[in-house]
Structures are given as C-alpha cells and as structure tokens.
Image (cartoon, helix red, strand yellow):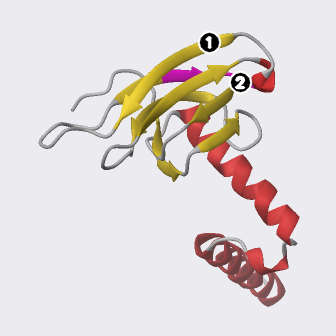
C-alpha cells in the first residue's frame, strides 16, 4: 500500500473515532434557544409516552391538555392529597369544551392505606383537571405491584 493511502486511511479512522466519541458524549444543548430546548423536551417526553416507558411526573392541582402540557398516552393517576384534602378528577374532550370522559372523587388516604389511583388514557386535546396535587406515570400494558 502506498504511504498516501495509508495516511488517508488513518486520517479517516481518526475522524470516525472523533465522531463516535462526540456522539457518545451527547449533543451540545447550549446552542439551542430556550424555545428550541422546550420543544425538544416535549418531543422527548412524547417519545417516552409513545414507547410506554415508565416515567412519573408530579404535578400541582390544575388543568392540563394532552398534546400541549402533557403527551397523549395511557397513565396511572395517583392522588397526592394530604390531610383532609379531597377533590374531583375529570377528563374532558376537546380541550375542556367537549364531553366529560371521566369523573372521580379522590382524597388523601387514611393512615396505612395506599393513595388512590386511576387508570386513564388521554388522547390529543383531552383536558385533565385535578383539584388536588397528583402524579402521572406513563403506562403501557399490565402493571404489576
């Protein structure tokens, strides 16, 4: 083999090793704008939901729309009320303007009891309203406890 070809082959191997090293370290996120970073985060969370990878978010009471604040998907809702707290959990279609799809009363657990859980699917545009703090865990298939 000619020395020029050997040099080119070595240079190509070095560049390939550098590319694999950079990919292994991850992408440089500092170059992203705030809005690009938020959009990337939403895409990553949506992919977690699409794949059904178990991931839990703890949220304050309020209203959340699937496809905006939450990815669409199947979830385990867990009531995080404490003390004498209680309230309604509702899911409405069409961003809160459509049919009521789910309605439950939830409250803080009595001593020694597990918190209340509700299994739900949120489709694009469904609005989840909770009067108490809660957690959502992405669910895919059977859940063993």
Mark 1 vs mark 2: which is more N-terminal? Answer: 1
Magenta stretch holds residue 121: yes
Residue at horizontal 83 percent and vertical 87 percent from the top: 4
Pointer 2 local density, CA inside 10 Å: few below 14, some 14–19, many at least 20: many
Quarter occupied by residue 140 = top left
Q: Answer yes or no: do the residues labelled 1 and 2 have beta carbons within 8 Å?
A: yes
What segment carries the magenta color? 120-126
> Where in the figure is residue 124, as x and y percent of width and height?
74, 25
> Where in the figure is residue 65, as x and y percent of width and height?
72, 35
Pointer 1 local density, CA inside 10 Å: few below 14, some 14–19, many at least 20: some
- 36 to the left or right of 69: right
- 101 to the left or right of 97: left
Q: Which residue is mark 1?
A: 101
Magenta stretch holds residue 116: no
In the rendered structure, find residue 126 and report the number of the disc placed on it: 2
- 118 to the left or right of 71: left
Residue at horizontal 32 percent and vertical 31 percent from the top: 116
Quarter occupied by residue 95 = top right
Question: Which quarter of the figure is the N terminus placed in?
Answer: bottom right
Q: Nearer the viewer, residue 4 or 89?
A: 89
- Point out the residue furthest to the left here: 112
Q: Nearer the viewer, residue 38 or 17?
A: 38
- Secondary structure under badge 1? strand
> Where in the figure is residue 130, as x and y percent of width and height?
56, 36
- Secondary structure under badge 2? loop
Label 1 and label 2: CA atoms lie apart by 9 Å
Q: Up-down: is 76 above or below 17?
A: above
Question: Which quarter of the figure is the C terminus placed in?
Answer: top left
- Point out the residue furthest to the front here: 84
Residue at horizontal 68 percent and vertical 39 percent from the top: 64
């Amino acid at each position: 083999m000619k020395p020029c070809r050997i040099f080119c082959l070595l240079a190509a191997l070095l560049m390939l090793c550098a590319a694999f090293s950079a990919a292994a370290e991850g992408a440089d996120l500092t170059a992203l704008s705030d809005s690009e970073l938020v959009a990337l985060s939403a895409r990553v969370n949506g992919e977690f939901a699409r794949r059904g990878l178990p991931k839990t978010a703890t949220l304050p009471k309020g209203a959340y729309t699937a496809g905006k604040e939450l990815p669409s998907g199947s979830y385990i809702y867990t009531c995080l009320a404490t003390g004498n707290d209680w309230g309604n959990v509702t899911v409405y279609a069409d961003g809160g303007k459509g049919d009521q799809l789910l309605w439950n009363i939830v409250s803080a657990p009595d001593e020694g009891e597990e918190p209340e859980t509700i299994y739900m699917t949120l489709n694009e545009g469904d609005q989840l309203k909770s009067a108490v703090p809660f957690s959502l865990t992405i669910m895919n298939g059977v859940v063993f406890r």
